[in-house]
Amino acid sequence: MTERTRFRWMILGVAIAAAAPYANVVRCGFVYDDHGAIEEAPLIHSLGNTWTLLASDTWIGATRQPSGLYRPLTSLSFALNWALTGASPAPFHAVNVALHVVVCLLLFAALRRLGAGSSTSFAAAVLFAVHPLHTEAVTWIVGRAELIGAAFFLGGWLVHLRRDDADPRVGSLVALLYFLAMIGKESAATLPWCS
């Protein structure tokens, strides 16, 4: 088996390891905070509310009580989900599972870029993919905030690791990915200290 073929199998293995534990979640409904953040949140029921979503607290819900959280990218992803698929929870869950797969693949790529061997990177990414710590982030639809933050965080970090200091566009791309991570979930604020 060539190294390229082996690498492709590793990518597929990480993707399967990330998706398989959550394959049954698409049959679940809305739970806990999902009700207030999605079902009872009229602002996400129309893409016409995009500017309002950008200017307001997340998880407003039917009560319109401010949450103190500013995660507009996550709210916009809910609005886009609603616009494309309606009120069915299955597509919302499917997006979360897909985002988890992306996060795991980005971690695999970042580990390889940091110099870990292919087998080590694969093992670490698979362990990360199946770790039960991610259950809440993947199965609760509102956990998408963590997934979006992690995806853009890892994407920004990966671009930073591959940077070409002579190209100013690279720094701009890292800054954009960092910004997107931050408006997905505020915990992405740690990116500048990961260089």
Image (cartoon, helix red, strand yellow):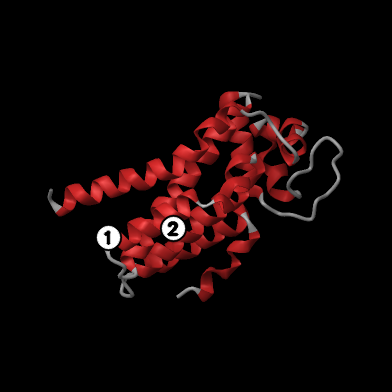
Depth check, mark 1 against mark 2: the one in front is: 1
Vertical placement of 158 versus 97: above or below? Answer: below
Nearer to me, 155 or 128: 128
Position of residue 66 measured from the top left corner of the image (x, y, whole percent): 83, 49
Q: Amino acid at mark 1?
A: Ser
Note whether residue 12 is visible.
yes
Label 2: which secondary element = helix
Vertical position of residue 79 compared to residue 72: above or below: above
Q: Which residue is mark 1?
A: 118
User: Which residue: 63% across, 56% down?
Assistant: 185
Label 1: few (<14), some (14–19) or many (≥20) C-alpha neighbours in 10 Å: some
What distance separates the C-alpha of mark 1 from that of mark 2? 19 Å
Give the residue displayed 54% in from the left and 40% down from the top.
Answer: 96
In percent of the image, x 52 and y 73: which residue is there? 192
Residue at image position (42%, 68%) is 171
Q: Residue 155: which numbered mark, if any?
A: 2
Q: Position of residue 97 (x, y in %)?
A: 51, 39
Which sits earlier in the primary sequence, circle 1 or circle 2? 1
Estimate how packed mark 2 is, as few (under 14), some (14 to 19) or many (20 or more) residues with alpha carbons within 10 Å. Answer: many
